[in-house]
């Protein structure tokens, strides 16, 4: 029969850690509305978030049961999850889409600081109509709705063994699909066709979802790395990058691979090698006690030596988990200290001439003594498709 | 070579209509941050929205060029789109992630009402940190940030011929995949396996993305319709529903199909027939001048006659387009008048005994004289998998 994605103690640990952090942030509770945080606290697996019609809420107070306050359409499914208490309303009901229920729940929760944290800060968005947020605020006396994002991100930054297991599984599937990819490639095929075949292969290998796939290609490099695959056919001299965000039970692998078609210029190959070496430096620097800024420096030294001036990505790695990207960022000014259980990407890139970038990416988890690579390391030599 | 998803006049028409509606809503501009609205105004195709790290903005004033205010990572890609003006910053930059640029753009735009519309209302969410929204508000004098959702939804409700073409293409691909599905089914296979094979088949047939797939199954019906496919194996007497939201160039098909395994109870078959008949009634009622409430009534009469008391979905159809669900809703109290170019789902459902629902769904476009079905109509008789 069906085996649960997580055992109950996984959620008990999350709630216990959340309560510790809430205390440090002087919060009486965390009220979340976004897909990843709702899933984190309840365990509910759905893609129904694609429908913007109904708001969903999960409240974790400092004491007592966690409460899901949800549209009726979700009751039978959420009742099967770990969550203790459920309140619902017949949504959509524009005049009161859960607001009075949420206000009641907030008023009934234990109060010490008069502050409840929402996803109001960095790398967060509140998933409810803003006019409903203001209506909720108006109904509350003695309870401030404040930025709970730092607390939430700190909580989610340290992954459990079970979470790491799912990320590892995603990374294994995507790695194997990337390994097999060159065999099916030839010039003349389009980015879209190549990515479609890769997607099909990932599903065949057991991936649950592929929420993100980006492709870019051009002579000896590419100007950017985030567009959806286009109908551009690959030609002799092109380098293609494919970047994949794919999940098992919602947990992301996020990494890219580069492929060369026919004759690639020496300058491009040198840039490719420099970025591969920078990735090595980033991986070596990743260990408990190091900061994200240290990682950035380790990679920057290699890229600068190779003549890199800049790239448009804005950072050289980030956290990942229930989202494709999570804090922290590998940036000069991000001094987050790495701890065991953090999962991050190492993602250096360089624009070696105007409009031509090379970007590499690997995923790893910080361990007690260093790090463990979760992706199958990209080959040092650019894989080449004969033309 | 690459052919554009839309011709320039598509965007010129969108902007012209937006300006007309803005005037009616007394808005000086529309400032959008969410993936579908950013795509609607710029034409940019990406799944990079999976990364919550950076905010993106598109401003459409009443006069002058539309401006995309975006992270540097997006500049080369967005510069290839229709959008006229581009401003960017080296994101992520937590201290000022675009806020000063957005404030400048708002201050420079023509001002008449002192009101700019954001996605603050029904079925909308602002995709930026709320603390940045407040910081932006503080920087503006004489410009109120107000709810622009009614204006945006009115604009997007009427689809162009090109938009309808992509929805039709999505519906055709999903219909054909659903038609082929029973051939590969047998008892003992799990919801997850069945949905994975269906997903692979849709990609093979040319779908661009499958952002939503839900499955539920049980003896003679199912208690809900929104969970991700589980590891539950299908057994004799089960009815399986699979609901798919799949896209071509971002435009959704959204409909479900029911499949019976082995011997299905007469009561379940009668409920299935009643919901099929309710769908017929909904399709017949869909024409210009009818209201969403009329559609709801037409379906309700059939379901009540069959003994339905309720279901947990909360409505019996909705708009669709760049999102899986869009306003309006087929509900007793939604008096939106149907107009040519609106694309909607007809989605009746009934809970015929406690915890056992049957739900059907089709997609259609309102035409000048009635409606055109975009999905291949589900068979009246429940398709049966022999055991």
Image (cartoon, coloured by chain):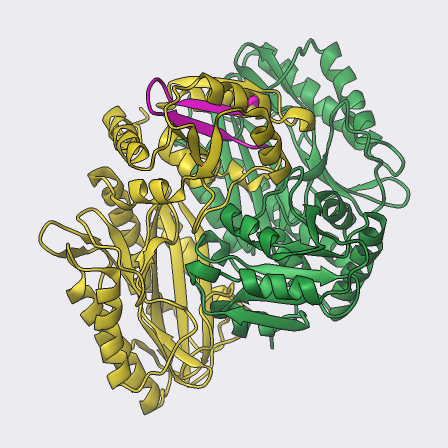
Chain colours: A yellow, B green
Q: Is residue A8 left or right of residue B208?
A: left
- Give above or below for B373 relative to A2: below
Task: Identify the image quadrant of the N terminus of chain B.
Answer: bottom right
Task: Identify the image quadrant of the C terminus of chain B.
Answer: top left
Query: Residue A38 location in percent, x, y?
Result: 43, 34
> A143 or B380, which is in the foreground?
A143
- Give above or below for A184 relative to B21: below
**Magenta extent:** A54-72
Q: Is residue B295 left or right of residue A283?
A: right
- Residue at far bottom of view: A266
Q: Who's the residue at 82% across and 61% down the image? A: B16
Q: Who's the residue at 57% across and 66% down the image? A: B101
**Residue B162 location, quadrant:** bottom right
Query: Residue A376 location in percent, x, y?
Result: 22, 61
Q: Who's the residue at 15% across and 54% down the image? A: A288
Question: Is A60 within the magenta?
Answer: yes
Query: Residue A338 location in percent, x, y?
Result: 21, 54
- Can residue A42 be seen at all in this image of the molecule? yes
Q: Is residue B262 left or right of residue A330?
A: right
> A2 or B309, which is in the foreground?
B309
- Residue at far left of view: A369
- Can residue B380 be seen at all in this image of the molecule? no
Q: Who's the residue at 73% across and 39% down the image? A: B344
Question: Is A103 within the magenta?
Answer: no
**Residue B233 location, quadrant:** top left
> A63 or A367, which is in the foreground?
A63
**Residue B320 location, quadrant:** top right
Question: In this figure, what is the number of numbered marks?
Answer: 0
Query: Residue A234 location in percent, x, y?
Result: 47, 77
């Amino acid at each position: 029969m069906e085996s649960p994605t997580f055992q109950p103690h996984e959620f008990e640990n999350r709630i216990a850690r959340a309560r510790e952090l809430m205390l440090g942030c002087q919060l009486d509770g965390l009220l979340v509305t976004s897909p990843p945080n709702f899933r984190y606290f309840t365990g509910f697996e759905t893609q129904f978030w694609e429908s913007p019609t109904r708001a969903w809420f999960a409240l974790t107070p400092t004491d007592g049961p966690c409460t899901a306050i949800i549209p009726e359409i979700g009751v039978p499914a959420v009742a099967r999850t770990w969550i203790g208490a459920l309140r619902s309303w017949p949504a959509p009901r524009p005049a009161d889409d859960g607001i009075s229920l949420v206000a009641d729940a907030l008023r009934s929760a234990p109060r010490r600081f008069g502050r409840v944290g929402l996803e109001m800060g960095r790398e967060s968005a509140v998933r409810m109509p803003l006019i409903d947020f203001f209506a909720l605020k108006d109904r509350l006396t003695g309870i401030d709705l404040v930025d709970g994002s730092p607390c939430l991100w700190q909580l989610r930054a340290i992954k459990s063994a079970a979470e790491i297991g799912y990320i590892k599984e995603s990374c294994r599937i995507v790695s194997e699909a990337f390994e097999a990819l060159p065999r099916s490639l030839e010039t003349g095929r389009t980015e879209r066709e190549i990515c479609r075949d890769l997607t099909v292969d990932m599903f065949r290998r057991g991936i649950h979802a592929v929420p993100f796939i980006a492709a870019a290609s051009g002579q000896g490099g590419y100007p950017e790395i985030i567009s959806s695959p286009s109908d551009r056919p690959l030609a002799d001299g092109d380098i293609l990058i494919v970047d994949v965000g794919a999940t098992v039970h919602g947990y992301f692998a996020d990494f890219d691979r580069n492929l060369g078609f026919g004759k690639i210029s020496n300058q491009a190959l040198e840039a490719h090698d420099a970025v591969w070496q920078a990735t090595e430096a980033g991986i070596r620097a990743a260990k408990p006690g190091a900061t994200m800024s240290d990682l950035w420096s380790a990679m920057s030294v290699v890229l600068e030596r190779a003549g890199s001036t800049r790239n448009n990505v804005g950072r050289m790695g980030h956290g990942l988990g229930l989202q494709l990207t999570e804090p922290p960022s590998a940036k000069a000014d991000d001094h987050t200290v790495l701890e065991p259980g953090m999962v991050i990407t190492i993602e250096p890139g360089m624009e070696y001439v105007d409009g031509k970038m090379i970007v590499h990416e690997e995923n790893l988890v910080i361990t007690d003594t260093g790090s463990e690579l979760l992706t199958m390391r990209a080959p040092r030599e650019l894989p080449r498709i004969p033309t």
